[in-house]
Amino acid sequence: MSILASLAKAYDRLPNVPPFGFSTEKIGFVISLNEDGSVASVSDLRDGTGKKKVPRLMQVPQPVKRTVAIAPNFLWDKTSYLLGVTAGEGKRTADEHRAFCEMHRGALAGTADPGLLALLRFLDQWSPERFTQPLWPEEMKDQNVIFALESERLQNIYLHDRPAARALWVDVGARNGDTEAVCLVTGTMGPIARLHPAIKGVWGAQSSGASIVSFNLDAFTSYGHEQGENAPVSEAAAFKYATALNTFLADDRHRIQIGDASTVFWADASDAQVAEAAESFFSAWFASQPDEGIEAGKVGDALGRMRRGIPLKDIEPKLAEGVRFYVLGLAPNAARLSIRFWLEDDFGRLAGNYARFVSDMAIEPPPRDGYPPLWRYLAETAVLGKRENVPPNLAGEWMRAILTGTPYPLTLLATVLMRIRADGEINALRAGMLRALLVRNFDMDPARTGASDKTKEAPVALDPHNRNKGYLLGRLFAAYEHAQMAALGRNVNATIKDKFYGAASAQPRKVFALLEKGSANHLSKLGKQRPGQRIYLERIIGDILEVMDPSNDPFPPSLSAAEQALFGLGYYHQRNEFFRKTDTVTEEAAQ
């Protein structure tokens, strides 16, 4: 199913969404009219106090899509159109107000509805000079405003809610969509949307909204068609898919941020509760901020069991089959939106791919704060750890690989290695990413290789029997560093990691002879202070050198990217083994 078709189908299942021709907009004030067109009151609809007042979300006739042209909305608008007043310079405010009046005089001509007649009389009587306090507050300027009859205001009935207004709005929409064709989404004949509704809420996109489908240059047109005629989508289908997508983007239960990709997701199941459970699972997998209620409840318990390797069919059988799941990643691209990824699959298969991802990322010792969300891993690929510095496209490519079970993007490997060389930080998150890339992209899964080939596996924890030269060199580098720190203390201005990690992991032959010479000096000094520790370190270094294969060039002139990843993995394992041994000795001494 296409993106637009699946979104249009999702609209039919969503509760409390605007009906066709309406949308949810931020409304600040309501002007209450008497039947003769005079103003009875002006009411502030915003919630909150002081400067923190927030406009109320209300369903109103769908707004026009404005570019540079003057185009008024039906029965509501901002004050420059509706009243001819604005807080700024307002070089074309008079033209905007004139367009609002002319449009409504034409649309409402011949009406007998008392509310619509009151609006026409108000427009005939109104002039911008009458906008003065106390009736007209200064903070009303540039807010969205609606109308109501004074006799109906207390019942929260507004002009656009009146049956006559809704009937007129349907007629106005029908006149605007004068081109009919077969809709590519529904397959039915109907009026074609010339311009599609704006999509709002995508991180980094224009606040006024951006488009998924648009044709605004001659180069984009075909066979003389203009705008939406190039890819005919009916007014109803365009409204449905845009409304559903905007609803998902505004709801944290259906939206997560993955790098620069605003990701929305939804489930399609015969049982609404089952669909909601699937969405809760997915949100818990990748959410930027864990929901304490979910983590502590049934979903959190099931999530923990999945991360321990228990299949979803043994945890929630209803979710394993019969639930169709959709994931859409959007990123800004000028006035348009780019599709970073689009996925449609059974939820059970997605759960299996997620469990495989968790297995790939397993590392010992694990991250201190428990299982981290995906954005924490992505932050490790960014300069200064800032989300906005995550390399473009990387988040979307990695997310697609996770959900489809395909190889991870190799740009992730290059980026992690580059960040390690740049800042010298090798933590659990980066080590986990290196291991995941080795397991999936370079076929180094210990569960598959077993004991058959100890040079082609990426272990979860320290493996003294691993014979891969990259892994052994990483362990040896960590041993040399520990010898330096033991001999000189932790207050060294620059450790060998600070000076030589990049060269040692890429071109070991140039560096390790120098490191071996330096370690001999450090061990000699350590022997005068703590002979026992010297013997321990010499044994560790000797064990590592003994496993190396002299016939297989243990100090090669260069290491491949995969071997550099194994170097980092070996370093991480061996370095943390030293700290674990130190902590154990300290605890025993305390007892």
Image (tube, rainbow, N blue to C red):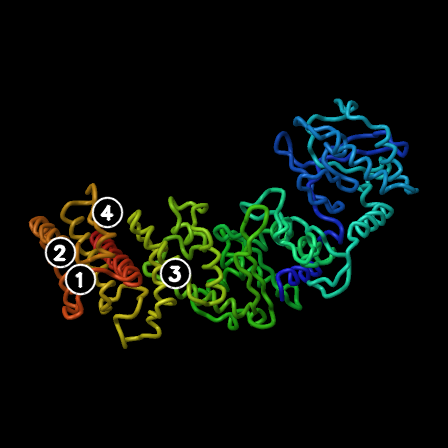
Report whether 486 appears left or right of 563.
Answer: left
Tag 1: amino acid: Phe
Depth check, mark 2 against mark 3: the one in front is 3
What residue is disc 4 on?
Answer: 498
Q: Which mark is first along the chain, 1 or 4?
A: 4
Q: Nearer the viewer, residue 272 or 354?
A: 354
Q: Is residue 184 at all visible to an observer of this figure? A: yes
Q: Quadrant of residue 562?
A: bottom left
Q: Name the residue rendered at 50%, 50% in the picture.
A: 260
**Mark sitting on residue 410:** 3
CB under 8 Å between callouts 1 and 3?
Answer: no
CB under 8 Å between callouts 1 and 2?
Answer: yes
User: Residues under labels 4 and 2: Cα distance?
Assistant: 17 Å
Q: Name the residue rendered at 90%, 42% in the picture.
A: 113
Depth check, mark 4 against mark 1: the one in front is 1
Q: Which mark is first along the chain, 4 or 3?
A: 3
What residue is disc 2 on?
Answer: 513
In the rendered view, would you say 332 is above or below 27? below
Of helix, strand and loop, which one carries label 2?
A: helix
What residue is disc 1 on?
Answer: 555
User: Residues under labels 3 and 4: Cα distance?
Assistant: 26 Å
Tag 3: amino acid: Leu
Disc 2 crowd rating (10 Å Cα; few below 14, some 14-19, many 20+) is few
Of helix, strand and loop, which one carries label 3?
A: helix
Report whether 179 appears left or right of 511.
Answer: right
Report whether 375 appears left or right of 147.
Answer: left
Tag 4: amino acid: Asp
Q: Nearer the viewer, residue 584 or 370?
A: 370
Disc 3 crowd rating (10 Å Cα; few below 14, some 14-19, many 20+) is some
Q: Nearer the viewer, residue 161 or 71?
A: 71
